[in-house]
Image (tube, helix red, strand yellow):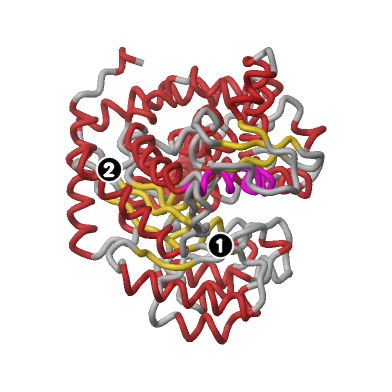
Amino acid sequence: MRFLLPFTYLFTICLAIEDYQTKRAKLLRDESTQSIGGKITLTDNETLVNNCLMQLKFREVDYGFENPQYYNFSRHYFAYKDDIRKSKVYKIIRDMPKGAALHIHDMGILDPDYVLNITYRDNLYVCFGNDRLKLKFSHAPPDSTCRWQLMKDARFSSENVTKFDADLQKHFSICVDDPDIVYPSIKEVWGAFTGYFVTVAPMMSYRPVWEQYFYDVLKKFREDNIMYVEVRSVLLNLYELDGTVYDPLITAKTYQKAYRRFIKDYPDFIGAKLIYAPPRNVDRSKLAEYLNLAYRIKENMSDFFAGFDLVGQEDVGSPLVEFIPQLSAAAKDFNFFFHAGETDWYGTFTDENLVDAILLGAKRIGHAYALPKHPMVMKAVVENDIGLEVNVISNAVLALVRDIRNHPLSTFIAQGLPVVLSSDDPGIWQADPLSDDFYVAFVGVASRLSDLRLLKQLAINSLKYSALEHNAKTLALNKFNRRWNEFIENFNCSKY
């Protein structure tokens, strides 16, 4: 005889399961609400766009889940960067207004093709030395320490211009076919990375090149649907063909001059500002020189000057704690946007830069990769509403993380932290000004369920945490909302 459970017992079990499912759904719903963009309510038209976007995203993510051996984001960025262009999600993100880019470094923004074209200018001398390629504009050979020749003569005498240019272009990127072999550790990739700047700086700091370069940087960002930028610069001494060398204040003014020319040509662009960001591997005497220049820049062009930072590989540079007296004194006069926590180490001066960045009143923190290891610092970030400038592709390329799913940005998104996505030095690894970073973050790092609300909030954050003054920021956000609504109204899923 079959045993039958009493009806009341079955009813109790059903109620228990229903209660469990209700609690489970609430936990997931609360997590979603806490995440970046979780409090945004989509309009009907935004929902239609979101439906299209998420169908396409699910295809990409689910294919990787079912076929992990082919999942792009678990591999090195160089292995899949060209495949990004084929993604329909990427194409939507490319067409989407993305607000601002707040963490970019001047000489690393435009791609190797652009840098190669500079070598076709007149009066460029080249020296193929044993240690490194040397490039400089001049009326005559720059010095007697190297076998200088005009670039046009070297190119002509090569007899194979295509091969000559291809070999030359390798100096303008750190992309390689076998990154795991060429860059087995952070030491090698950072060596190549810093080597790029050593190579191009003497060529790029020719005043006419520098001025045109920044104009073209702004144009490239505008084409990528960016409306505002804050560029970090070491402010190299610009020079002329006759050997005239300018004070770095002139370099800052050259940025402003290029910006004014650009905004006249493209009045729909919101604006640009300069963050003075000299190298961090210095002593207190050199820092005093840096701060003195920062005061001069602020005095001469306060509207264009955003603030101060120190740059370079943190693990080998001087930590902020060494400069506390000087930086504390300057904190009342400057906005700080410190690089901090760009490291895999824990309990070192490098990751403790996060502590000093907070205590020095930084308005934003660059990278903040090590932040999850410091819960009290993370709490201070939230309480003080400090923007986190996250550069996902940069962190992957420069050997902090291999499988992008493990990037701490996933934690930042889940906890609703004040994240601003940026791109660092996209030209050096042949990425878009910002769309590639948005795509990799959205598909590779964020939750499978993160949707259009995340993208919209990240774009809003980029303007919210900018160095724009209050009224200008309000106008910028209004302008962004108009652009966003136009994108939504004109969206056609079949286009993708």
As displayed, is residue 61 above or below residue 403?
A: above
Give the number of marks. 2
The kind of secondary structure the magenta stretch mainly shows is helix
Quarter of the image that includes the C terminus:
top left
Q: Which residues are magenta?
A: 193-206
Q: Nearer the viewer, residue 277 or 252?
A: 252
- Determine whether the residue tagged by mark 2 lies in a helix, strand or loop: helix
Determine the CA span between mark 2 and mark 1: 28 Å
The answer to whether any part of residue 423 appears in the image is yes
Q: Position of residue 406 (x, y in %)?
A: 64, 44
Task: Residue at 63% x, 18% y: name it.
Answer: 156
Judging by the rendered image, the residue that carries numbered circle 1 is: 339
Q: Indicate whether residue 411 is drawn in magenta.
A: no
Q: Position of residue 289 (x, y in %)?
A: 54, 76
Residue 262 - label: 2
Q: Position of residue 428 (x, y in %)?
A: 58, 38
Task: Residue at 73% x, 69% y: name it.
Answer: 348
- Determine whether the residue tagged by mark 1 lies in a helix, strand or loop: strand
> Quick check: 3 left or right of 6?
right
> Quick check: 412 left or right of 38?
right
As displayed, is residue 86 above or below residue 252?
A: above
Given the image, on which type of amino acid does mark 2 rest? Phe
Mark 2 vs mark 1, foreground winner is 2
Q: Circle 2: is it few (<14), some (14-19), or many (20+) Cα within 10 Å?
A: some
